[in-house]
Image (cartoon, grey):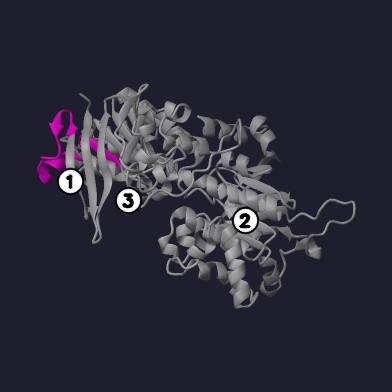
Amino acid sequence: MPAEQASPPGGPAVPRLRVENLHKTFRSGRGGGDRTAAVAGVSFSIAPGEAYGLVGGSGAGKSTVARLVLRLLPATQGRVWINGQEVTSLSPRQLRPIRRRVQMVAQDPFQALHPAMSVRELVAEPLVIHRLGDGAEREERVLRALEEVALTPATTYRNRLASELSGGQRQRVAIARAIVLEPSLLVADEPTSMLDASVQMEVLSIFRELRVSRGLSILLITHDLAVARHTCQRIGVMRTGTIVEEGPVQRVISQPRHDYTRALLEAAEA
Amino acid sequence: MALLELRDLHVSYSTPDAEVGAVVGVDLDVDTGEVVGVVGESGSGKTTLILAALRLVPLPGRIVKGSISLGGGDLRGLSPARMRTLRGKDIAYVPQAAMNSMNPVMTVGAQITESLDLHTDLNGRQTTARVAEVLEMVELEGKIARRYPHQLSGGMRQRAIIAMALAPNPQLVLADEPTSGLDVLVRVQLLRLLRRLVDELGLALLMVSHDLPLVARWCDRAVVMYAGRIVEEGPAPELLTNPLHPYAWALARSLPRLHGEDDLERIPGEVPDLSRVPVGCPFNPRCIHAFDLCRERAPQLISVGGHNVACHLHAG
């Protein structure tokens, strides 16, 4: 285990992700006069091997939080730590080794994968970008990642083009692409909302297995409380840029404390 | 006799390699005051089914066999011109993601007016009154008539679309994924609205969705489609609580739940490509109960305990 993840003797483990008082304000309109606070003071942390869900309706700011965590967007205010290291103020060059440790799975596997690239090229690409391993080692890591996402036997899938794959298979390639770098944190933004119902479970069970077998930490963005319940240990319920309720997923679902959580639960059961 | 009756309907798409059956031998009734749900995954033929009822299957697709009747009148034999007067007037269609396809440079009121000008004989004053009436029907304020689509939220746009569809007073509404892309809370409001409109106006609503729990909760009857075929039909709530077809059963058991056990079923494999539908029962390669007959002969729909189900397990 890398030193950065080691726990101090007797103390709690360093969180894989810690977010403190995160804000993001978008400007729009003439001269940028209109301001929209998409994220307005969000704090949470994710322990090693923990899956944490951000749950809420459209426009709650969930995806913006994901993008701030990945530093795809600069935060207006607030700080983000990854494996104990503050990343908010790092330069792009300093950020590069950290990006290896934090990977993302996007919502739409049809847009996320180049249709004319083979599965092997797609999954090996992150290794090429980060200049990891030689040809033989890359091939081995690609095959291992494909096995982990149940695209087996991996040798039959590696030469297929993305355009030849179904939605569920594509999303599994997207996950393989994310885990081939052996990240410690995976950010997944609505990873099953575009998938058919009969393959959703397959993808969710891959997340569960990766968490258990690799100790991977997961930040799951979803509007679906049942998906969060199946995948996460703790959730934060977001509305209009803030977390209105947080807790163990079972507790939040069985004894919601905030009216908005109750409304979400009623809508899910109505 | 039901308002809409589809009998032995077959729709195929011609490709250079093969004739691909998107809808295969479908029988379906939708009656006044009834919400019928069609549940299926991508490639199950559910959207093609709705388009066939409107005779709008895009080329290279065509209706190859079967009958479509509305209020006892045959639709398949109608001239294209006559069919055009029927669409929008007697049969309203709400396509998928309709709220994103409104004309951005026309006000909501102008777009509803367009629909009324095309399909009714109302004069200017009556048209204005009807616009106000249908907006109220979908629980939108009258001033929304003067708004442009971009000034409205997704939920409001979807209500405006429904107002447009209902303005000429149709008997039958065909809606393709009417709540997809909407916020979870807004979705429930919209489904309540649709249910109320069906009950109050005596509409017939045929709704296509990939969401089994949604159909189970909001529809009266439902059919489950797989690879272009109806594999089960029954009272909508029972598709979640008492599904008979192994596909419907596995689907219901695979959905994440809020309460109760979390040990979920995984359905092996993928939805078949319609150009390579397995011989016999189309679900057989993914079915844990499949036996020899399932790989040889396609099962017919038979009546079992108030459902119709196409599965050899339930035959004799």
In this image, A208 relative to B89: left or right? right
Disc 3 element: helix
**Rendering coords of residue A10 (x, y %):** 90, 51
**Rendering coords of residue B304 (x, y %):** 35, 24
**In this orientation, which residue lies closer to the viewer: B47 or B240?**
B240
Q: Determine contact: label 3, label 2, CB under 8 Å.
A: no
Q: Determine contact: label 1, label 3, CB under 8 Å.
A: no
CA separation, marks 1 and 3? 16 Å
Q: What span is in magenta?
A: B69-94
**Three-letter code for the amino acid on which mark 3 is drawn:** Leu
Q: Is residue B112 magenta?
A: no
Name the residue located 52 percent from the left edge and 69 percent from the top edge: A120
Discs 3 and 2 share one subunit: no
**Three-letter code for the amino acid on which mark 1 is drawn:** Val
Q: Is residue B289 visible?
A: yes
Q: Is residue B86 magenta?
A: yes
Residue that protrudes farthest toward the top in the picture: B305
Count of all numbered marks drawn on residues in the image: 3
The residue to which callout 1 is attached is B64
**In this orientation, which residue lies closer to the viewer: A120 or B172?**
A120
CA separation, marks 1 and 2? 48 Å
Determine which of the numbered discs, if any, sits on residue A187 in the image.
2
Estimate how packed mark 3 is, as few (under 14), some (14 to 19) or many (20 or more) residues with alpha carbons within 10 Å.
Answer: many
Q: Which image quarter is the C terminus of chain B in? A: top left
The residue to which callout 3 is attached is B274
Looking at the image, residue A70 lies above or below residue A55: below
